[in-house]
Amino acid sequence: MSSDKQSALLMFNDKAKDHDYDDMFIKVSIMTPVPEPETYALMLGGLAVLGAVARRRKAQKP
């Protein structure tokens, strides 16, 4: 195991050196995605459009 709490390393060694391709190295990393600024801009734009539509519908009701 790796000392990092968000990744793990699994290894199989070929100590006999028989070249049977059973060696395996696997590293699994858990990465938290970081949204780009465009994502926030699109989300805020969508919320603004929904707010405008809701305000317009409320104003049209008698």
Image: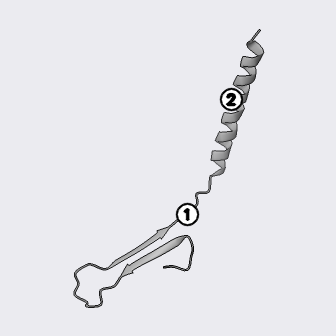
Mark 2: which secondary structure?
helix
The mark nearer the N terminus, 1 or 2, is 1
Q: Is residue 8 left or right of residue 16?
A: right
Residue at image position (74%, 13%) is 60
Q: Is residue 35 left or right of residue 8?
A: right
Query: What crowding class fits label 2: few (fewer than 14 Cα within 10 Å), some (14-19), or many (20 or more)?
Result: few
Residue 27 or residue 35, whichever sits in front: 27
- For residue 14, above or below residue 49: below
Taking 62 as reference, is 27 left or right?
left
Q: Is residue 59 above or below residue 7?
A: above
Residue 62: x %, y % from top left: 77, 8
| The label number, if any, that marks residue 21 in the structure image | none
- Residue drawn at x 55%, y 70% is 6
Residue 57 image offset from top left, x and y in percent: 71, 18
Residue type at the position of mark 2: Leu
Q: Secondary structure at mark 1?
A: loop
> Where is residue 29 shown, x and y percent of the image?
50, 68
Which residue is denoted by mark 2 in the rendering? 50
- The mark tally for this picture is 2
Quarter-of-image position of residue 33: bottom right
Label pair 1/2, CB-CB below 8 angstroms: no
Disc 1: which residue: 31
Q: In the image, what residue type sits under mark 1? A: Met
Q: Is residue 35 above or below residue 56?
A: below
Along the line of sight, the residue nearer the viewer: 23 or 44: 23
